[in-house]
Amino acid sequence: MRLDGKTAIVTGAGSGFGAGIARRFAAERARVMVADLNPDAALAVAHEIGGSARTCDVADPDSVAAMVRAAEAFGPVDILVNNAGITHLPAPMEEVSEADFDRVFAVNCKSVYLTARAIVPLMKARGTGAILNVASTAGLSPRPRLNWYNASKGWMITATKAMAVELAPAGIRVNAICPVAGETPLLKSFMGEDTPEMRAKFLSTIPIGRFSTPEDMGNAAVFLCSDEASMITGVALEVDGGRCV
């Protein structure tokens, strides 16, 4: 019961890593708002874990503000997990369309700004809070042909450290986790095609020899957002099976 009595928002929690984090938070007795652009997916996970569901476009300021207001109705938000993220398909950097570039940075980067703008004042007023940004090993050890996705996750890691330094005096901790590619809906997009050959190529770069799982992310997220990690802020924890070694 490491999160007993705490209220958490997890974005992009209708599937993949976000769903894994939401499930682990609920198992540790947190009240969880499952936020996702897909209302049916959010509702399904919320029903499974006994949480609440919220349709949210994390790149839209009004949608983000409404999400935070709705979560606060259940109690002060103690934990925010910025998990929602997208990628562009693998391509030479100069061939990625401007529309895809804008979409990647809106969802992966602008969302962190929008959620901070909505929730940091509330956490400051209470003198406590934990924010977790789901970055990627791509922000630490980039892969070719995913250039702008790599850059967006590098931005998220730098933002995490900058937020941590500024918000520490206010009692707010900010950390990131950096998963390697996992069994999520984005896996096919990262690889370009989901074939045994492409999977073998990806797995050959991971010393432990398997993809990340939602459970892996959930376990790391519980620790970093719990009081057990009260002295940890500004880290980008590699949950990657040795990918970045």
Image (tube, rainbow, N blue to C red):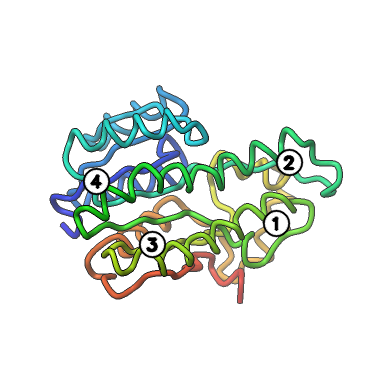
Pointer 2 local density, CA inside 10 Å: few below 14, some 14–19, many at least 20: some
Query: Horizontal and vertical percent for residue 34?
Result: 34, 36
Label 3, label 2: how many angstroms apart (C-alpha)? 29 Å
Write down the residue under mark 3. Answer: 174
Q: Residues within 10 Å of mark 4 (few under 14, many from 20)?
A: many
Q: Residue at x 30, y 69 (%)?
A: 169
Nearest to viewer (mark 1 / mark 4): 4
Q: Which residue is mark 2?
A: 89
Residue in the foreground of this view, choosing between 210 and 146: 146
Q: Which residue type does callout 4 highlight? A: Val
Q: State if disc 2 and disc 3 touch (CB < 8 Å).
A: no
Q: Quadrant of the C terminus?
A: bottom right
Of label 3 and label 4, which has the lower sequence position?
A: 4
**87 vs 129: above or below:** above
- Residue under the image location 22 percent in, 66 percent down: 227
Question: Which amino acid lies under the numbered mark 1 shown in the image of this protein?
Answer: Ala
Give the mark nearest the N terminus, 1 or 4.
Answer: 4
Spatial CA distance of label 3 from label 4 is 14 Å
- Give the residue at mark 4: 77
Q: What is the C-alpha distance between the residues marked 1 and 4?
A: 41 Å
The structure residue drawn at horizontal position 38% and vertical position 30%, both measured from the top left corner, is 42
Q: CA distance from mark 3 to mark 1?
A: 35 Å
Measured Cα–Cα span from mark 2 to mark 4:
35 Å
Whole-angstrom CA distance, mark 1 to mark 2, is: 19 Å
Circle nearer the N terminus (3, 2): 2
